[in-house]
Every structure is written in structure tokens, then in C-alpha cells.
Amino acid sequence: MKQKLVLFFITIILYWVLKNYVPYGGYILYPITLLVTFFHETGHAFFAVITGGSVHGIQINNDGSGYAMIAGGFSLLVIPGGYIGSALWGNLLLYVSLYRDRYSNIILYFLMAILVFTSIVWFNSIGTSAVLLVFAAVIYWISRLSKSVQNIFLIVIGTSSLVYILMDFNGGPSSDLAKFTSLIPILPQFGWALVWLAIVVYFTHLNLRGIWKKS
């Protein structure tokens, strides 16, 4: 457990340094950025589906941005769903890798299935589907490796997903915040960003505290 927690904190530091202080560090993080963007967009899609909406496509752009084409659903959950969805993915991967590592293969297969499902059922472009299928192939390859390698992968990706939320907060998930603020204008965009961040931080705190106590 201690070694895993050390890797958790090292990943936070490395991500932050590469993103902010290393020239061309963004290129090193590029594959992770694309995968975390996928987490974000599937978050929108998930909350749309569970609230009665439908998903017509998911796009991952070359610059690391993306969007989900959604019809219907409960907007007050769908709009922040990308931000919260990244947190759910990150915490799920950390929970499995830090505490339930015997299920690491299962979570890898689940992630691979979501990638393949999205590339086919929520198809939007050949480029996006190709990227998602490459990720699925890489994850399948990792699933055939040792348990320690699987855990390293899950910790790095799960932690990066959470750190990305902070980085996104720094710039502001402006489009989602703008839509949400227009629906509930009782707070400015920055105010809602703080609310979303507080939800994510609290949920992550509960997850990590629970893992620590159970371990």
C-alpha cells in the first residue's frame, strides 16, 4: 500500500511539472490527455442516459478537446457530468488499484469494453474511433501483463484524471460552466466552478480516506 501511495503522489507531481514547467511536456502527456477527455465526455453521456436522454456521438479532437452530442436528459446533471464523470473514473481506478487490486483485470476489461462500445455505437468520426480502438488494444495488452504493471497503469491514469480536473479548473471548463450558469444564474461561473470542485474534492477525500482505513 505504501508503495502505491508513493506512486500516487509521484504521479501528481510529475503531471503538474510536465504540464506547467517542462517545455513540450504537454506532448508527453498527450495520450493521457486524450484518454481523460474520453472520461469527461463519457461522463456527459452517462448522466444523459440515466436521466432519459440519448447519445448520438462522442468526439475526441486532436488538440485534446472533445464533445458529446446529446439529446434530452436532465441538463442540471448532464452539463456538470463531464467534470464529475472524470472524478468518478479517477476514483474508481484508484479504488481498484489501491485497495481491490484483485479486480484490476476486470476494471481493465470494463474500460476496454467502454472504449470499443463508444467507438462503434457512439461513432462520430473515423479519427475518434481509431484513437479509442488503439487505447482498447493497449489496455488489452496491459491486461496480459503482471498485476503490478496493471496497478501502475491504473494508479497513473486514475491520478491523472483527478489532476486534470484541477488543471481544467485553473483554465475553467468554460463551455460547460457557461451553459450551467445560464440555467441557474444565482452564482457566476467562477462560483459554480468552486461548487463543482468542492464536490469532486470531497468525493475523492471520502474515497481515499476509506481506502486508507480499510487497508
Image (cartoon, rainbow, N blue to C red):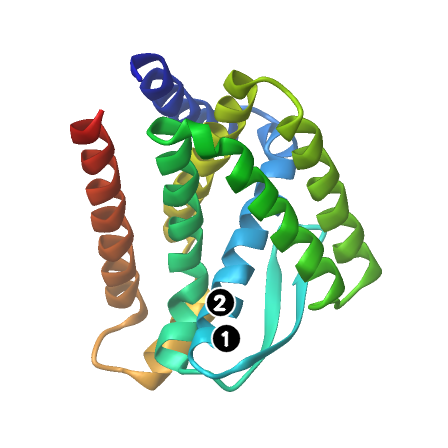
Is residue 20 in view? Answer: no
Please say if the residues under marks 2 and 1 sit with CB atoms less than 8 Å apart. Answer: yes
Tag 2, which secondary structure? helix
* Camera-nearest residue between 69 and 206: 206
Q: Residue furthest top?
A: 3
Asked where in the image residue 84 lies, by quadrant, the reply is: bottom left
- For this orientation, the residue located farthest to the right is 126
Q: Amino acid at mark 2?
A: Phe
Asked if residue 110 shows in the view, the reply is yes
Q: Quadrant of residue 206?
A: top left
Q: Quadrant of the N terminus?
A: top left
Q: Residues within 10 Å of mark 1 (few under 14, many from 20)?
A: some
Q: Quadrant of residue 149?
A: top right
User: What's under tag 1, amino acid-wise?
Assistant: Val
Give the distance between the C-alpha atoms of the residues marked 2 and 1, in whole angstroms: 5 Å
Residue at the disc numbered 2 = 46
Q: Residue at x 83, y 59 (%)?
A: 126
- Find the residue positioned furthest to the left: 213
Residue 129 is left or right of residue 155, and the answer is: right
Q: Dot 1 lies on which element? A: helix
**Residue at screen point 45% across, 23% down:** 14
Residue identifier under label 1: 49
